[in-house]
Amino acid sequence: MQPAVRWYISKEGFSAIASERLAGLHGHRSTYSHLDLIQDYLTKLAPGRQERPASEFELVIPADDEAELIAARTAEQIARAADFDQEAINQIKTALIEACINAAEHSDSPDRKIHQRFAIDKDKLIITVSNKGKGFGRANGQSTLAPGAQPAKAARGRGLKIIRALMDEVEFERTDDGARLVMTKYLKRPGSQ
Amino acid sequence: MSTAEIRSRLIENAAVIYPGLYLNQLRGERIENQCQEFLAAGVRRIVINFEETELINSIGISILLGVIESVNHAQGALVLSNLNASNRELFEMLGLMSHIEMVDTEEIALVKLGRESEVVQAVI
């Protein structure tokens, strides 16, 4: 008789010792991020929603100085491959930088990571920026600066305003362990002439 | 990660500052410190040349606004030059065009500051 399969899920993963013990118990290990990925994938496969993104990329950056530049460069390459013009590419880069800065400021996760997903879907690019923490600050109307975070001098609300102005759609979502910002840029704006 | 160094130089008692590739909090603070040094040294005409600047974030802009305020308070003048279309759009989008002086090139900025200096001297 085969032993029961156990699936252990932790907010941020397991230590080496815990992993070794769980392996001895024939247990599978996942984090909340894995669950999010599985959930997203299953949602896309749900009946009535047969379409899947043409291409998806994921990136994880540290919430350190200038790491958001790496994200911007990645977004640039992806947007260029999706035939966005240079003006749109610049707007995407700028919005993504602001999203990363917000995520870094308001994340209270000890791993200080910012997760990004880039999905090219027909005529649009969908960028998801997620962090573990209380949210994206002013996005949800609450001041949720992480302990020890240094609020930027008078940056009040400008970052969010920039994101909303440069991207075609912006949505904030709460996740089990943090928050997610979903930004969409269309190759051609809906209803444009 | 790259260093947060900025460049600057003096041209006939006017200072020109080059923020570099990315104006963020680190470089914004460097610019702020550099401007304070120039002001302390008696320099009252400052140009910030964005020719090399590809990206600006909201924190950099906030610091920049503080720098402009400091320069104005010291009876000086500060002009931004060489902004690319994307960065110019950023200032327009944030409704900041009335708070800043913006010209196309460093040369135009220096001429403008020179003329303003002559006007101030004439008034005095």
Image (cartoon, coloured by chain):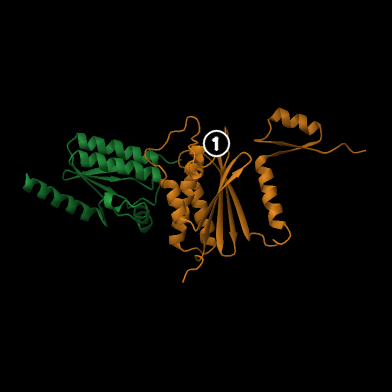
Chain colours: A orange, B green
- Image side of residue A13 versus residue A93, left or right: right
- Chain identifier of the residue bearing label 1 in the image: A
Report the amino acid beneath label 1: Arg
* Residue with the most extreme top position: A17
Q: Examine the rendering and report whether any part of residue A142 can be seen.
A: yes
Can residue A67 be seen?
Answer: no
Helix, strand or loop under label 1: loop
Q: Position of residue B75 (x, y in %)?
A: 17, 41
Left or right of A10: which side holds B99?
left
The residue to which callout 1 is attached is: A112
Q: Is disc 1 surrounded by few (<14), some (14 to 19) or many (20+) residues within 10 Å?
A: some
Q: Nearer the viewer, residue B122 or B112?
A: B122
For the image shown, how many numbered marks are present on the structure?
Answer: 1
Q: Is residue B76 left or right of residue B85?
A: left
x then y, percent, for residue A91: 44, 56
Q: What residue lies at 50% left-to-right and 33% top-to-bottom?
A: A146
Quadrant of image for the N terminus of chain A: top right
Residue lying at 17% horizontally and 53% vertically, measured from the top left: B111
Residue B107 position (above or below residue B26): below
Residue in the foreground of this view, choosing between A68 and B61: B61
Q: Is residue B73 above or below residue B111?
A: above
User: Who's the residue at 13% across and 47% down the image?
Assistant: B117
Residue A15 in the image, given as x and y percentages of width and height: 68, 30
Quadrant of the rendered structure where residue A177 is?
A: top right
Q: Residue furthest front?
A: A141
Asked which quadrant contains residue B62, the reply is top left
Asked whether A35 or B81 is in front, the reply is: A35
| The furthest residue to the bottom | A193
